[in-house]
Structures are given as C-alpha cells and as structure tokens.
Image (tube, rainbow, N blue to C red):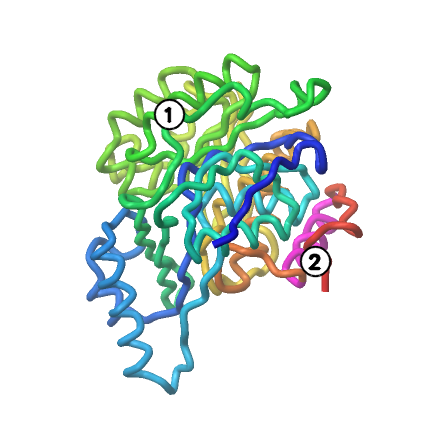
Amino acid sequence: MGLEIQSEDAIHGAPLILGLQPSALVDHVATVDSSLLSRIPGEAGGSFPVVAEELKFVLSEVNSHFDAFPEKGASLKTIAGGSVANTIRGLAAGFGITCGIIGACGDDEEGSLFVENMSSYNINLSRLRLKTGPTAQCVCLVDEFGNRTMRPCLSSAVKVQADDLTTSDLRGSRPELVSMVQWLVMRYGIFNIEVIQEAIRIAKQEGVLVSLDLASFEMVRKFRLPLLQLLESGGVDLCFANEDEAAELLSDEKADPESALEFLGKHSRWAVVTLGAKGCIAKQGNEVVRIPASGESKAVDATGAGDLFASGFLYGLVKGWTLEECCKTGACSGGSVIRSLGGEVSRENWQWMYKQMRIKGLPVPDHNNFVCDKS
C-alpha cells in the first residue's frame, strides 16, 4: 500500500523523549448516552482490551445507536490514538519537544492514518516498525458528563516484541546524538509486560529515565501483582496514576490518594496522583504538593486528560522546573484536551493552555513555529 517509515534522526535530530507504544493505535471516538453504554460488555468508565469480534460488536452497536437517533447528528471521529501517542503528540505540538515513538503499525488503512497524523507533528517515526497485519484500534465512548469508556482491540494487532528492541532504539542514529534521549514514556499493560520489562532494562543500561502510567483501574485490578513487581523492581523513575487506579493499586476502595501517593513515592523518584476536577497531588522525595485543576475548563471529553497532564509534567522536568511548576503545567495541558472530543488538542485549546500558563506565572513555550499553530 506504499506506506514507508524512514529514518528521521538526521533530519529532526534524536528525540529528547521517546514513547514506547508497542502497537500503533487508531481511536474511534463518539459521544453516546447511558442507554448505549449499558449494552457494551464490561464496566462503564474503564478501559479493558477486547478481541476483534467484540470490537466489531461495539462498533455495530454504536452505528445502530446513531441510526436510531439521527436527530442527534452523532458520528464516529477516527484519529491516531493511544495513551503514549497522546502524550508524545502533546509534547511535540504544544511544547515543541523533539519526540519519537517506538512501536509497530500494520500495513493497512489504520496504519497509514497513524503515520500520517504523527508525522504531521514532526514526531520521529524511525523506530516505528512496519509489519504485515492489522493496526490496533480502540473505541472511545464519551457520555454526557465527559467520562469515557474505552475498549481497545490489541490481541490481533501487530506489535513490537521484547526481542525486537535494541539499544539503538534508545540512541540517536548519529554518534554525536547518542546521549540525547532523556526519557522513555510507557503505559502499563499486561499484554505488553515482557516488552515493558525489556525496555526498562535497556533504558537503565543507557541512562534513560522511565515514566510509567498505570493505564486503567480495570487493568490494575485484574493484574495488580505483575504491576507491583514492576514498581518494586526500581526501574520506574516517574509514575502517574489517577485516583481510581490508585485505590486499586492498594486493593482498598477506601484507600485515599495520599496513601497511594506515599506508596508510589517509595518506588519512584517522582509520583503523581491526578484527581480530575480536584487537580493533583505529587511527591518527590520528602516534598509533597497539591495543585488545583486549571481554569474553568468544562469537560466535553475526558479522553487524554491524564495523557496530556503527563505531557506538561514531563515538559517541566525537562526544563528543570520545581515539582509545583511541573504540576501546574500538567494541570494546564490536561485541561486543554478535555475541552473538545478526542485526545488531539486543537490550536484554539493550545492557546487556552498558554493563557492559563501565563496566569499561573509559568514561562510559556516559544510556540510561534510549532505545528499546533498551523492554519
């Protein structure tokens, strides 16, 4: 189908931040009501993998729902997605950080869409393998309150395996760029546990810091033990969790976010628990900060809120900012994405973020030449 992925280190320079997303993924995003969510397998509000037949069923239910209520004018919005891709795209588009993706995409229409979208933000795709087979897909259903229910289909999709990874994935292709990569961004997933473990091993060998997002409360609940082992290995430098994931991590519905933050802080240099409309709490060593959410941002769609929070927080770390400044920046970027449907921030909403950063007294990135400012 003519899809090519070329080496880009010589063009854009080696990435400062790399994201490991073993399977490139395309999101099908739609606004729905509770009557549809009740017909979808699994608990509403979470994210848990489905097989190909279940994906087809969910998409069929969504389209049937739209056909039954044409007056609502609803439809599916299809975009490049995945938690890690959202974070990396946010760093590149909103903050001007040189970023890249490690993973694999299929030789299909969805693979072409993923490559086209990420390339449009100058994201380095030289570590994205093109493989024969389908690209991963995810249905993201957003209710009237902006909450999302996600059903990714990963089982049959092409992906990077643990033995595909090499030290060159975390280095530049030119000798003078070898030490440029600072961070490796990942998301917890039991189906990717081996590649995650191998990536952490290589990252530690190469002196690259590791960021891990806990994915979803369903994933933490069902696969808590492997996650604990991963955290206790000492290879994770920065850990992000929302309050639902934090409660599942401690296996206690009554566990407060502060207890989870204390636990995560024992196993990582930086720990963050996001609290939705209540902001976030974060810990670095003995320092703990609590930051409110940014501005009056009505949640149209919560998809990508945590991913874009991570973009802002990581930007602050790259800039050497304080823990409080990193959290404030994350609150601004996280607030920007929930103002519209999907995990891709519009030009208008990036401008909203820059305004919020100015209000908080934060240095605003020199965004005049960023991709997000294209007409």
Highlighted range, magenta: 348-361
Q: Residue furthest bottom?
A: 71
Residue occupying the point 24% across, 35% down: 252
Distance between mark 2 and mark 1 Cα atoms: 39 Å
Taking the spot 56% from the left edge, 60% from the top edge, the residue there is: 297
Query: Compared with residue 204, is residue 91 higher up or lower down, i.e. above or below?
Result: below
Residue at the spot of label 2: 351
Q: Could you say whether the residue bearing mark 1 is in a helix, strand or loop?
A: helix
Which is nearer the N-term, disc 2 or disc 1? 1
Q: Observer-nearest residue: 241 or 198?
A: 198
Magenta stretch encompasses residue 55: no
Q: What residue type is labelled 1?
A: Ala
* Horizontal and vertical percent position of residue 346: 62, 61
Q: Residue beneath label 1, please?
A: 162
Neighbour tally class for label 2: few under 14, some 14-19, many 20 plus, Cα within 10 Å = some
Lateral position of residue 170 relative to residue 229, left or right:
right
Q: Residue at x 33, y 25 (%)?
A: 194
Q: Main secondary structure of the magenta part?
A: helix
Is residue 141 at least partly visible in the picture?
Answer: yes
Left or right: residue 266 compared with residue 352? left
Quarter placement of the C terminus? bottom right
Q: What residue type is labelled 2?
A: Gln
Q: Can residue 263 be seen in this view?
A: no
Q: Position of residue 170 (x, y in %)?
A: 55, 24
